[in-house]
Amino acid sequence: MTQEQQQTKESAPTGRDSPQRRSIKSFVLRQSHMTPAQQRAIDQLWPQFGVDFQAAPLDLNSVFQRAQAKILEIGFGMGTATAEIAARLPEKDFLAIDVHGPGVGNLLKLIQERELTNIRVMRHDAVEVVEHMLADASLDGIHIFFPDPWHKKRHHKRRLIQAPFVAKLLPKLKSSGYIHLATDWEEYARQMLDVLQGFTELTNSAADFATTPDYRPETKFEARGKRLGHGVWDLVFIKK
Ligand SMILES: C[S@@+](CC[C@H](N)C(=O)[O-])C[C@H]1O[C@@H](n2cnc3c(N)ncnc32)[C@H](O)[C@@H]1O
């Protein structure tokens, strides 16, 4: 059995009404090459900047050792945009989550190179982190930039931005906190708009799609999309 078949088998639903029915499986872990520098960054910097998964709420102020605004980023990829945003917004703290090992190593390397102190990194399924580790009203913002679009219709169930997951995310935001999404896939952008507009506790900061906020630089995935001729759609909604 290939690794992909194994993943698919493991993620088979256990039945619509079963309490064990698993939540979204939004990624497939592929074998990818970790450079020696990325591995070294993990070996040396994880104790200082890494956060291990635990099935209990995390005290974010004690993790960052200060009581500044806390932003969650889901799916940082190689972490280049994450490091740039953290450098632009030194007064905010960023909990950055991805499952991709080389990206985790790369972000840790960027933290060291840029001497950033306001990022902590998790290598885990963000869905589980949201479900088990984040206290209600603990976040000032949520960034999800270019989540995997899962283009094929039969894969749409793997998309992160669906009402059931957003319903789990929103209680983690404080009142006046924001959720900022971006995508280069127009049909997913419309789905994102429909999903967020369905929550009465959210207000759209724009008429529909937002102008890209100044703090968000171009991400790696966005640059790739633009090379392929894709557009870019940002959405920024505020919690009442
Ligand atoms: C298309 S990439 C975009 C990366 C980056 N935001 C960018 O714009 O370049 C999506 C990323 O989300 C990560 N991802 C998908 N589902 C995830 C989950 N449930 N938990 C953590 N990371 C996830 C993937 O590993 C991948 O790195």
Image (cartoon, rainbow, N blue to C red):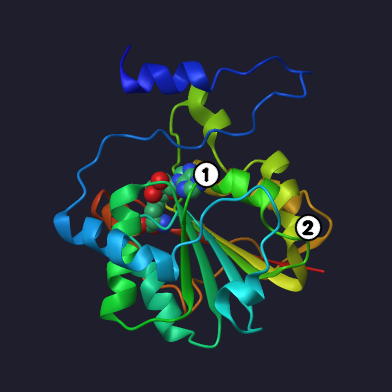
175 and 12: which is toward the camera: 12
Image height check: is 62 above or below 183? below
Label 2 CA crowd tier, 10 Å (few <14, some 14–19, many 20+): some
Ligand 1 within 8 angstroms of badge 1 C-beta: yes
Residue 23 position by quadrant: top right
If the image is split into quadrants, where does the C terminus sit?
bottom right
* Label 2 residue SS: helix
- Kindly identify which residue carries mark 2: 171
Q: Looking at numbered disc 2 in the image, what kind of residue is underneath it?
A: Pro
Report, in whole angstroms, how far the alpha carbon at label 1 lies from the one at label 2.
19 Å
- Kindly identify which residue carries mark 1: 125
- Judged left or right of residue 191, residue 117 is left
Observer able to see residue 176: yes
Ligand 1 within 8 angstroms of badge 2 C-beta: no
82 and 225: which is toward the camera: 82
Indicate the position of residue 98 as horizontal and vertical percent values: 44, 52
Observer able to see residue 186: no
